[in-house]
């Protein structure tokens, strides 16, 4: 089992009496890519600043690689690389010169600095732009150079704040793939803050969902959707030949099935749905159930002599998580069914 490199316990930070981070507890293991996910103002940046020792917690504790960032910010800075959402470079110097300068500032010996800078420029796909002034770099190139800049001091952890902001989709995919491969090759721990679900889904081993300073849930996407949608029925869509009333009633009587409705028409008028299905030669039905009854439903349809064309279980993904917890975040916070922070 990999060691815990970031350990946050009951962390709280308020600004003017408003809690920006509220009782946050989170552990991250070495080599993990963890996504801090949440809408604007959720508390992601405040958490990052406290991890870096740039802001002091009101309550709770943080341990980064055995260090307390509030008390030992310099050793933390040596071991943790931070890429802000808009990284600044000396615009009139080349990419290579900027990297060498950062290496020097981090006490990397001169001979090593240049060699490492070249290697990193190659790793991030910027070898062709090594001698170009950074003022002429595109946003995507700047982010790549930012990654190289963060890596030049050979950190154990890198923290990236909205790393793909303002980059086109292709550049975004490439940057994320690069982060993933760098992490795998070097056993690097990556903490990535974002409000873009799809990019986080692509590369993170685990994500934490932040809403209004609180961690609503954490885990990998599969365990998150299981815990967040635990109270919802499973949704099974059945494509078959036209259904008859008796068959529908028997499907409704399968243990675990909560409801079964023809999805043609408005779903309430079986006769209309059947007529429509009859003319099309097939019908669609939505079944909501507590357990996966797919096999029992399939068997029943086939035994009834009705053709079965397809049967699909709906999986909840980040889109549903997003709609429910970010867009409807406030309602959910007030609702009684909101799950507390979950462990994966
Ligand atoms: N220096 C500050 N002074 C006052 N309030 C602050 C300060 N920094 C953050 N806040 C407030 O704390 C809350 C959390 O902000 P934070 O920047 O941590 O969120 P975030 O999740 O990083 O959002 P974003 O994606 O917009 O950066 C917000 O309500 C914000 O207005």
Image: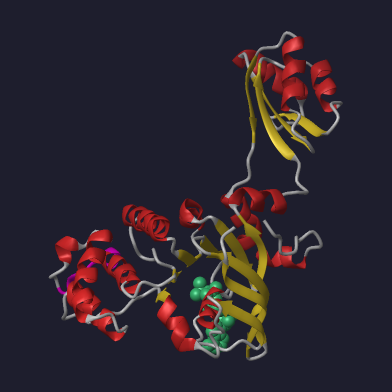
Q: Is residue 71 above or below residue 199?
A: below
Asked whether, in this view, residue 298 is left or right of residue 125, the answer is right
Q: Residue 139 magenta-drawn?
A: yes
Asked whether, in this view, residue 214 is left or right of residue 232, the answer is left
Judging depth in this view, the residue of 107 and 70 nearest the camera is: 107
Q: How far across and how far down the image is residue 81, in percent?
A: 41, 75
Identify the residue shown where x is 69% and y is 67%.
330
Q: Is residue 264 visible?
A: no
Q: Is residue 271 above or below residue 65?
A: above
Q: How far across and how far down the image is residue 147, in percent?
A: 33, 68
Q: Quadrant of the C terminus?
A: bottom right
Quarter of the picture for ligand 1?
A: bottom right
Q: Is residue 305 visible?
A: yes
Q: How far across and how far down the image is residue 26, in percent?
A: 63, 69
Give the residues drawn in magenta, as a range: 133-140
Identify the residue shown where x is 72% and y is 63%.
332
Identify the residue shown where x is 65% and y is 53%.
224
Q: How far across and how far down the image is residue 107, in percent?
A: 30, 84
Asked whether, in this view, residue 77 is left or right of residue 313, the answer is left
Judging depth in this view, the residue of 332 and 64 nearest the camera is: 64
Q: Residue 24 magenta-drawn?
A: no
């Amino acid at each position: 089992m990999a060691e815990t490199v970031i350990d946050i316990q009951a962390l709280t930070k308020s600004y003017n009496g408003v809690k920006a981070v509220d009782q946050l507890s989170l552990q991250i293991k070495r080599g993990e890519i963890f996504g801090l996910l949440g809408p604007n103002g959720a508390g992601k940046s405040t958490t990052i600043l406290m991890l870096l020792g740039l802001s002091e917690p009101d309550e709770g504790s943080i341990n980064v690689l055995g260090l307390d960032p509030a008390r030992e910010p310099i050793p933390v800075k040596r071991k943790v690389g931070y890429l802000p959402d808009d990284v600044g470079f000396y615009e009139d110097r080349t990419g290579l010169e900027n990297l060498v300068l950062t290496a020097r500032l981090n006490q990397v010996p001169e001979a090593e600095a240049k060699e490492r800078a070249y290697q990193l420029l190659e790793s991030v796909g910027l070898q062709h732009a090594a001698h170009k002034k950074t003022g002429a770099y595109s946003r995507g190139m700047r982010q790549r150079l930012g990654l190289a800049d963060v890596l030049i001091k050979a950190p154990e952890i890198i923290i990236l704040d909205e790393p793909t902001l303002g980059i086109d989709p292709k550049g975004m995919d490439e940057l994320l793939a690069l982060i993933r491969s760098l992490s795998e090759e070097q056993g690097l721990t990556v903490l990535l803050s974002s409000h873009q679900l799809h990019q986080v889904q692509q590369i993170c081993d685990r994500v934490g969902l932040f809403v209004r300073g609180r961690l609503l849930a954490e885990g990998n996407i599969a365990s998150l959707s299981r815990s967040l949608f635990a109270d919802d029925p499973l949704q099974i869509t059945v494509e078959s030949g036209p259904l008859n009333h008796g068959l529908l009633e028997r499907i409704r009587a399968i243990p675990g099935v909560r409801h079964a409705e023809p999805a043609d028409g408005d779903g309430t008028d079986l006769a209309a749905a059947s007529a429509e299905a009859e003319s099309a030669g097939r019908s669609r039905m939505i079944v909501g159930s507590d357990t996966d009854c797919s096999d029992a439903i399939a068997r029943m349809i086939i035994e009834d002599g009705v053709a079965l064309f397809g049967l699909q279980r709906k999986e909840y993904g980040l889109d549903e998580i997003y709609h429910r917890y970010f867009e409807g975040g406030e309602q959910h916070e007030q609702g009684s069914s909101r799950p507390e922070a979950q462990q994966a």
